[in-house]
Image (spheres, grey):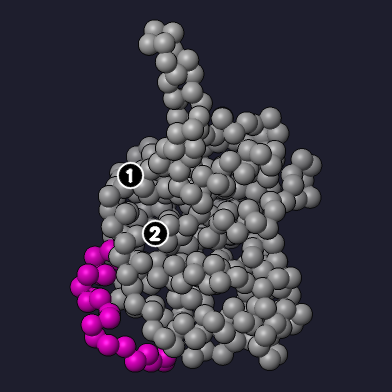
């Protein structure tokens, strides 16, 4: 078992953390009734939201990406919008547009779907680069500038983007600079036999979303985000994160990029994102401080698309790094 020397003043009392974990467990249990057989993916998605990040899902149509986004928004009591990205989608279709009102003789802004708390950007890699950039800039800045006026996006704000396999016609991979805007990248994959049988016997799961009672609200989510950011990280854990970053760049003996399958190393910003995700994972688990196991749980999802440009290949590279770098 890993032991960290920490001052009692730096670790929050467990009594402040456990209620959050209990509420999160209830939310995840309700989501698992709709998105069947994807418990770890659901927890990662919730942790991604609590860490103030965005989620990229790379997968084929029909495996539950839209259902996951809509169910998550409903369970958390957040406004939801879905945008189907196509080759003719314009930035104004996502952000909004100012239209002249003859009655008032002034321009009136009509907000686009980006002004919802949870936005599903479906098939983002089918849209032209200009539209992709408009969305990703809004994700990074959490505001949009239209007609010289800056408009804040809601808090919390969470984008779930889906990306088709690049071998499909009309699909193009996102540039590395845009991939880096996503905290996590995941594959849903096909359900196992048991989950698939439950899906077939139970009918369309999306019909159950309307009956899903909200178990939180926007203010609660913002509080959870603050609590996660305040979780303690021991110096020994920072050493472990730095060792993972160094190994990804080929600086650690026996853990170079050639050995792990990684095409590029992790940036300092990736390290910060990894810590944010680990804090959120620990909060959902009811722990008042971050453990190495929390870092390991989120590392493939956070680092994979940064190491190898895709969720599947990147997850393999991330697992190789975890095996190569010893625990503190």
Given residues 42 and 302, the one toward you in this image is 302
Given residues 264 and 211, the one toward you in this image is 264
Position of residue 31 measured from the top left corner of the image (x, y, whole percent): 41, 53
Q: Residue at image x 53%, y 60%?
A: 183
Classify 211 as above or below 323: above
* Residue furthest front in the image: 148
Magenta residues span 1-21
Task: Give the alpha-carbon distance from disc 1 to disc 2, as whole Å.
Answer: 14 Å
Classify 140 as above or below 229: above
- Asked whether, in this view, residue 132 is left or right of residue 52, the answer is right
Residue 77's disc number? 1
Position of residue 228 measured from the top left corner of the image (x, y, whole percent): 35, 66
Q: Residue at image x 69%, y 51%?
A: 174
Whether residue 190 is visible: no
- Please tell me whether mark 1 sits on a helix, a strand or a loop: loop
Position of residue 202 measured from the top left corner of the image (x, y, whole percent): 48, 45
For label 2, the residue is 50
- Is residue 10 part of the magenta span, yes or no? yes
Sequence-wise, which precedes: disc 1 or disc 2? 2
- Please tell me whether mark 2 sits on a helix, a strand or a loop: helix
The total of numbered circles placed on residues is: 2
């Amino acid at each position: 078992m890993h032991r960290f020397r920490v001052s009692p003043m730096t670790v929050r009392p467990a009594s402040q953390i456990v209620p959050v974990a209990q509420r999160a467990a209830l939310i995840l249990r309700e989501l698992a009734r709709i998105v069947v057989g994807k418990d770890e993916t659901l927890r990662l998605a919730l942790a991604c939201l609590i860490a103030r990040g965005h989620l990229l899902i790379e997968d084929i149509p029909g495996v539950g990406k839209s259902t996951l986004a809509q169910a998550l928004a409903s369970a958390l009591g957040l406004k939801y919008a879905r945008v189907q990205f196509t080759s003719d989608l314009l930035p104004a279709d996502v952000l909004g547009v100012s239209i002249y009102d003859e009655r008032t003789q002034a321009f009136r802004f009509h907000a686009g779907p980006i002004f919802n708390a949870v936005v599903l950007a479906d098939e983002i890699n089918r849209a032209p680069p200009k539209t992709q950039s408009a969305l990703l800039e809004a994700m990074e800045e959490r505001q949009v500038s239209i007609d010289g006026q800056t408009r804040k996006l809601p808090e919390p704000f969470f984008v779930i983007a889906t990306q088709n396999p690049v071998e499909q016609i009309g699909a193009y991979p996102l540039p590395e600079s845009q991939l880096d805007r996503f905290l996590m990248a995941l594959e849903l994959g096909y359900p196992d036999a048991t989950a698939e049988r439950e899906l077939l016997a139970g009918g369309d799961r999306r019909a159950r979303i309307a009956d899903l009672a909200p178990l939180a609200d926007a203010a609660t989510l913002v509080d959870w985000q603050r609590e996660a950011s305040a979780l303690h990280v021991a110096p020994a854990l920072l050493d472990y994160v730095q060792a993972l970053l160094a190994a990804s760049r080929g600086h650690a003996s026996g853990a170079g990029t050639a050995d792990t399958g990684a095409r590029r190393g992790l940036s300092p910003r990736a390290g910060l994102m990894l810590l944010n995700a680990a804090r959120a994972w620990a909060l959902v688990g009811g722990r008042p401080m971050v453990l190495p196991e929390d870092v390991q749980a989120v590392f493939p999802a956070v680092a994979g698309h940064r190491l190898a440009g895709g969720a599947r290949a990147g997850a393999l590279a991330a697992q190789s790094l975890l095996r190569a770098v010893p625990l503190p």
